[in-house]
Amino acid sequence: MALHLKKDSQLARRHEQENPFFALQHRMNRIFDEFLGEPFNLFGWREEPSMFTPPMNISETDKEIIITADLPGVEEKDLEITVTKDDVTIKGEKKQETEEKNKQYHRVERSYGSFTRTFALPQGVDESKVSAELKKGVLKLTIPKSPEAVAERKKVQIKTD
């Protein structure tokens, strides 16, 4: 029976402390994961995973939270954004197809990938007034703070000697 423990899980640490064989197996799993980490097919070609993680930036001002995401090749119809008072989830799918014809060959390449990112939101956001804009492959999501949350801010003075 093979037991694969996730890296840094509480269960793995507990088993490692209780039984040295679990610790050895956990270390061996990590070594194999690091060694065989790149996905290759039978012919040795590197295969791209079907999921991708687009880079996203989160910034905050006194009045709003702004999330920007680089989503080249993702169209508006392939995006889904949901916001609650606790979190925001951005889901999307990228579909890309290129075709090249020549007298000697006909090449068609297709790539697909999906992603889901969820971010926790601080208390006091106004989820009813969220706006989203997709321009030139960049998504800008603006989440305003409620007037109460803006008014609650208090600057703390720092004392020096």
Image (cartoon, rainbow, N blue to C red):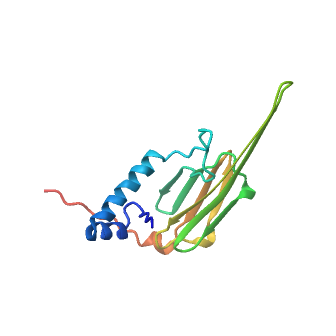
Front residue (pair 114, 159): 114
50 left or right of 9?
A: right
x and y, in percent, of residue 124 in the image: 49, 73
Which residue is found at the position 44% from the left and 51% from the top? 33
Q: Position of residue 132 (x, y in %)?
A: 65, 59
In which quadrant of the rendered image does the C terminus lie? Answer: bottom left
- Residue most toward the front? 1
Q: Is residue 154 left or right of residue 74?
A: left
Q: Which residue occupies the foreground of this view, 63 or 67?
A: 67
Seen at 56% across and 46% down, the residue is 39
Most extreme residue toward the right is 103
Q: Residue furthest top?
A: 103
| Residue 1 in which image quadrant | bottom left
For the residue pair 133 and 18, the one nearer the viewer reads as: 18
* Residue 75 left/right relative to 142: right
**Is 27 or 116 nearer to us in this picture?**
27
Q: Is residue 62 left or right of residue 79?
A: left
Look at the picture and state if 13 lies above or below 40. Answer: below
Picture coordinates of residue 23 (x, y %)?
31, 62
How many numbered marks, from 0 up?
Answer: 0
Above or below 26: residue 31: above
Question: What residue do we see at 44% from left, 63% from top?
Answer: 4
**Residue drawn 39% across and 50% down?**
31
x and y, in percent, of residue 144 in the image: 55, 65
